[in-house]
Image (tube, rainbow, N blue to C red):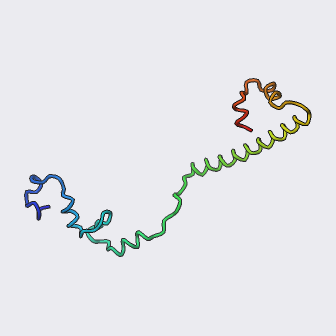
Amino acid sequence: MENKYGPNWRVVHPELDGAVIYECVGRMPHGKLGIADGAISISEKETIKTRKRCAQPNATAREKRLERENKELRKENDRYHELQRVVRAMAAKGGMDYDALVQETVPNLDAKSEDAVS
C-alpha cells in the first residue's frame, strides 16, 4: 500500500486495496494466498490439499447412542406391527370387528392414531 499510495497511505486511502494485496501475494487466484510468507511452498500446499479426508465426520457418543436407540425402537415398532397383523387376522377369523374391539378396550384411542399404526 505504501508503494502505491505513499508513506501517508492510511490517511489518503484508509481501506485496503484488493488489487494491491493481489499483486503483493504473487497474483495467485482467490483462496491461494501465500501462507506464512512462503514458509509452505505451492507443492506442499498441493500435497496438503490432496490428502485423503474422512468421508464421514466423527460421530459423537451422543449421536451414536441416539442412532442405537432409534434402531432398537424401529425393531420394537416392527414387532408391534406384526403383533397387530396377527390380532387383526385372529379377529377376522373369529368374526369380530378389530376396530370395534380396539374402541371398546381403549375408548380414548382415536381413529387417526390407529390408522398411523397400520
Q: Is 85 located above or below residue 107 in the figure? A: below
Q: Position of residue 48 (x, y in %)?
A: 40, 70
Tally of numbered discs? 0
Going 52% across and 62% down the picture, which residue do you hit?
A: 55
Residue 23 horizontal/vertical position (percent): 20, 67
Image-quadrant location for residue 89 = top right
> Residue 76 occupies which quadrant of the picture?
top right
In screen coordinates, is 7 left or right of 76?
left
Please give the name of the residue rendered at 7% of the width and 57% of the height, measured from the top-left corner: 8
Q: Quadrant of residue 19?
A: bottom left
Q: Nearer the viewer, residue 47 or 112?
A: 112
Expressed as whole percent of the image width and height from the top left, the position of residue 42 reads 33, 73
Quadrant assignment for the C terminus: top right
Q: Is residue 81 left or right of residue 38?
A: right
Q: Which residue is at a point 9% across and 52% down the rendered structure image?
A: 11
The residue at the far right in this view is: 94
Q: Nearer the viewer, residue 10 or 82?
A: 82
Residue depicted at x 62% and y 50%: 67
Q: Position of residue 24 (x, y in %)?
A: 20, 67
